[in-house]
Image (cartoon, helix red, strand yellow):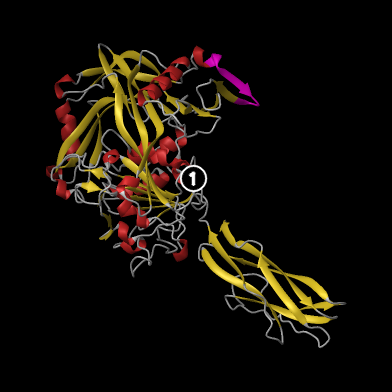
C-alpha cells in the first residue's frame, strides 16, 4: 500500500441481470494550490439498465492498490453515486499531476480519468539563510535570522520574527553552488534538497561576495542562468529570494568607473542587451523567476552586508510598517546603495507581489506575461546635510541622556480611542484615519492608514509629496528645533512584456519615502543623529495620501558632563585595523554623529560614533574585496 493516504482501489463486478451503461468520476477541485497535505475528493456515478449488484474499484495514477471491495445494489435501472478521496502533498511531494478512475471489475469498463493537479505552498513563515563566504558574511546570514553572530553574541536588535521557522544552512559545507542550481537548468541541481536547498522555504536570504553575473558559494560560484526559483514542477516552493551582494541585480548604465556608483541609475536603462556598460536585470534574472515565485530582490550597486544592514531591513518591516519589497529597498538602500526587486505578473504592476504588504506563502497568481521591477530613485535633500572635515571634529561633547517622550499637544488633539484602539484622524491619511501603535521600549509611535493605497491617475510631483508629508508631521507636533535634514526618494517602477523590446518598457512611480533626521545642538555645534532612531519616516502615495508614518525620537536631556572625542585620524586607523586587507581598500565616505537605536531598543544615552565606508581600490577585484562598513566609537577613553 502506498504511503500516500486515501481511499484507493475498490474491486467491482456486475451481475448478469445488470449492465453498466455509464461511469463518471470528477475531482472536487481540478487544480489545488495551498497548504498541504491536500485532500482531493472525487465524486462520480455508476449507471445500470436493470436491477442487480455491481462491484467496482478505484484506480489511480500512482498504481496504489487496496484489497477492499465495494458493491452497489440497484433495485431498478438508474444511477448511484460513488465517492473517494486522496490525501497527498507536502515538502517531499510539493507538486503532483495525477488521476483517479472507477473501474467495473470483471469488465473493461472504466470511467474517464479524473485528472487533477496540486501545488503545495511552503510552510508559512519558513526562512533559510546562507552565506557565500566565511568572512563576516557568515555572521550576517545568522544575524538576519536570529540577531546573533556565529559566536552567539547579540548584534542586531531586529531580525526575522521569533515565531518563524528559521534555519542557517550551508554551515560547515564547501562548494555549495549545486544547492542553488535547478535541474531544469543544469545537470547537477539540488535546490530542492530537504536540508540545504534554497528553493524550499517561503523566504531565502543570501549574504556574500558577488558581481553582475556571479556570486560566491563557499568555493564554487552561483549564476542567475543556473537557477529557477519557485519551480513547482521541479519540487521548488520558494516565494521570496533576497540577496545581499554587490551588483548581482545591476541594472542601467555604468555611471562612473572605479567607484561605488557603477550601476546607481536603474531609471536610465536604455533597453539594450546586458553588457558591462549597460546592465539588463530583465535579461539576466527574468529566466530565473519561476511563475510561482513572488519576488527576487538584490542590489544594483555596491552593497554593505553587515549586522547593521540586516538590522535596518527588519527595522523597516517590524517598526515602520514597510511592505516586503520596501523593507528590503529602504533597509539596504542609501544615497549610494540601490536595491531592486523584480517579479513576474500581468500587465498591471499594482496587482503583483511587489505590492505585498506582508509575507505570504501563497504562490504568485498575478500572471506571467510581464516582468516588473521596483527600486528607489535619486535622493532629494532639503536643508544641507552636515559635511564633516577631519579638522572640524570637536575635542569634547556633552553627554546626551534619553527619556521616554510624551505625546505632543498637537498629537493629542487628533488622537481618539475607538474600541480600545488608538487612532489619529486626518484627511491626509488614506481613509482619513490611521491606527496607532506604540513601542514601550523607546516611546516610538507608528501610524498605519486605514485605507488601501491606490494607483492614482495623476501623480503629484516629488516635491509636492514631500511637502505634504512634512505638513502632516508638523500638524502632529513631530517637528521641533532638533529637526535636521529632510530627504525624499521616489519609488520607481518599470514593466516589460516577456520577450518585449526596449520600446515596450512602461515606467511608473509608486510614491515617495520621506525621512526626517534628527540634529542636536550641543554647545555651539550641530550634530547629526545617525542610526535607525532619531528619524521620522513617511510613506506617501503618488496622490499625496500618507500610508504609514513613524517616529523614533526619544526625548533628550543634555547635562554638563562632557566626554573626550577621538580625533578623526585615530578613529580612521582603528577602522583600517579591522580590515583584513587594508591596502586593497580606499575610503568612500564617512560620517560623524550621535547614534540613536531602533524603536524596539531600550536606550539611556546617545553614544557618539564614526562610520566609515570602504570600497576596493581596484574595481576588478570587487568580488575578492567587497565593501566594508565599520563603526568606531568616537569617545576617547
> How many badges with numbers are in the image?
1
Question: In the image, is residue 359 above or below residue 232?
Answer: above
* Front residue of this view, candidates 418 and 185: 185
Q: Is residue 131 visible?
A: no
Question: In the image, is residue 369 above or below residue 521?
Answer: below
Q: Is residue 339 visible?
A: yes
- On whether residue 51 falls in the magenta region, the answer is no
Q: What span is in magenta? A: 412-421
Identify which residue is drawn at 30% across, 26% down.
380
Seen from this angle, which residue lies furthest front? 503
* Front residue of this view, candidates 407 and 246: 246
Question: In the image, is residue 69 above or below residue 483?
Answer: below
* Front residue of this view, candidates 261 and 588: 261
- On whether residue 416 falls in the magenta region, the answer is yes
Badge 1 local density, few (<14 within 10 Å), some, or many (20+)? some
Q: Position of residue 625 (x, y in %)?
A: 19, 47
| Residue 55: quadrant of the picture | bottom right
Question: In the image, is residue 252 above or below residue 445?
Answer: below
Q: Is residue 539 left or right of residue 246?
A: right
Identify which residue is drawn at 64% across, 64% down.
40
Q: Secondary structure at mark 1?
A: loop
Q: Position of residue 333 (x, y in %)?
A: 32, 37
| Image quarter in which the C terminus is found | top left
Amino acid at each position: 500500500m502506498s504511503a500516500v493516504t486515501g481511499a484507493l482501489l475498490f474491486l467491482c463486478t456486475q451481475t448478469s441481470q445488470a449492465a453498466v451503461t455509464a461511469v463518471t468520476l470528477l475531482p472536487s477541485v481540478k487544480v489545488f494550490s495551498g497548504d498541504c497535505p491536500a485532500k482531493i475528493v472525487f465524486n462520480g456515478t455508476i449507471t445500470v439498465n436493470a436491477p442487480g449488484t455491481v462491484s467496482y474499484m478505484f484506480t489511480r495514477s500512482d498504481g496504489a492498490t487496496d484489497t477492499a471491495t465495494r458493491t452497489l445494489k440497484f433495485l431498478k435501472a438508474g444511477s448511484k453515486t460513488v465517492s473517494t478521496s486522496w490525501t497527498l502533498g507536502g515538502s517531499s511531494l510539493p507538486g503532483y499531476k495525477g488521476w483517479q478512475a472507477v473501474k467495473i471489475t470483471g469488465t473493461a469498463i472504466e470511467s474517464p480519468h479524473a485528472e487533477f493537479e496540486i501545488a503545495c505552498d511552503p510552510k508559512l513563515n519558513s526562512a533559510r539563510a546562507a552565506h557565500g563566504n566565511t568572512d563576516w558574511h557568515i555572521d550576517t546570514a545568522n544575524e538576519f535570522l536570529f540577531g546573533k553572530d556565529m559566536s552567539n553574541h547579540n548584534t542586531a536588535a531586529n531580525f526575522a520574527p521569533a515565531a518563524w521557522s528559521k534555519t542557517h544552512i550551508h554551515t560547515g559545507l564547501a562548494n555549495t553552488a549545486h544547492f542553488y542550481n535547478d535541474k531544469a537548468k543544469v545537470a547537477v541541481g539540488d535546490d530542492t534538497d530537504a536540508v540545504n536547498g534554497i528553493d524550499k522555504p517561503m523566504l531565502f536570504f543570501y549574504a556574500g561576495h558577488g558581481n553582475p553575473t556571479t556570486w560566491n558559494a563557499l568555493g564554487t560560484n552561483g549564476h542567475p542562468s543556473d537557477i529557477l526559483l519557485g519551480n513547482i514542477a521541479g519540487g521548488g516552493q520558494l516565494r521570496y529570494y533576497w540577496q545581499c551582494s554587490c551588483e548581482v541585480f545591476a541594472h542601467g548604465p555604468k555611471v562612473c568607473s572605479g567607484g561605488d556608483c557603477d550601476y546607481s541609475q536603474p531609471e536610465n536603462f536604455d533597453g539594450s542587451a546586458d553588457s558591462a556598460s549597460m546592465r539588463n536585470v530583465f535579461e539576466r534574472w527574468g529566466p530565473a523567476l519561476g511563475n510561482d515565485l513572488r519576488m527576487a530582490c538584490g542590489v544594483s550597486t555596491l552593497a554593505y552586508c553587515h549586522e547593521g544592514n540586516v538590522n535596518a531591513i527588519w527595522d523597516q518591516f517590524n517598526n515602520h510598517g514597510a511592505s516586503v519589497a520596501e523593507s528590503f529597498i529602504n533597509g539596504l538602500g542609501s544615497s549610494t546603495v540601490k536595491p531592486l526587486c523584480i517579479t513576474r505578473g500581468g500587465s498591471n504592476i499594482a496587482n503583483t507581489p511587489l505590492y505585498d504588504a506582508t509575507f505570504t506563502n501563497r504562490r504568485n497568481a498575478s500572471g506571467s506575461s510581464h516582468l516588473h521591477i521596483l527600486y528607489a530613485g535619486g535622493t532629494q535633500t532639503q536643508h544641507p546635510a552636515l559635511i564633516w572635515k577631519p579638522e572640524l571634529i570637536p575635542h569634547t561633547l556633552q553627554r546626551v541622556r534619553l527619556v521616554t517622550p510624551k505625546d505632543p499637544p498637537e498629537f493629542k488633539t487628533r488622537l481618539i480611542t475607538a474600541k480600545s484602539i488608538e487612532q489619529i484622524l486626518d484627511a491626509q491619511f488614506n481613509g482619513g484615519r490611521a491606527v496607532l501603535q506604540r513601542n514601550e521600549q523607546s516611546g516610538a509611535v507608528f501610524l498605519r492608514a486605514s485605507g488601501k493605497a491606490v494607483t492614482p491617475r495623476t501623480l503629484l510631483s516629488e516635491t509636492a509629496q514631500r511637502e505634504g508629508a512634512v505638513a502632516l508631521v508638523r500638524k502632529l507636533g513631530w517637528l521641533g528645533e532638533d529637526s535636521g535634514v529632510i530627504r525624499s526618494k521616489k519609488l520607481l517602477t518599470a514593466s516589460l512584456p516577456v520577450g518585449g523590446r526596449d520600446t515596450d518598457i512602461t515606467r511608473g512611480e509608486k510614491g515617495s519615502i520621506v525621512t526626517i533626521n534628527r540634529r542636536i545642538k550641543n554647545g555651539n555645534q550641530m550634530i547629526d543623529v545617525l542610526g535607525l532612531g532619531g528619524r521620522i519616516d513617511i510613506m506617501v502615495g503618488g496622490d499625496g495620501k500618507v500610508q504609514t508614518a513613524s517616529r523614533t525620537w526619544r526625548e533628550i536631556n543634555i547635562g554638563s558632563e562632557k566626554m573626550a572625542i577621538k580625533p578623526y585620524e585615530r578613529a580612521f586607523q582603528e577602522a583600517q585595523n579591522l580590515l583584513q586587507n587594508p591596502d586593497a581598500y580606499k575610503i568612500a565616505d564617512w560620517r560623524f554623529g550621535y547614534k540613536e537605536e531602533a524603536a524596539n531598543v531600550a536606550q539611556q544615552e546617545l553614544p557618539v560614533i564614526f562610520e566609515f565606508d570602504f570600497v576596493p581600490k581596484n574595481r576588478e577585484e570587487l568580488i575578492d574585496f567587497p565593501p566594508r562598513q565599520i563603526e568606531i566609537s568616537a569617545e576617547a577613553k
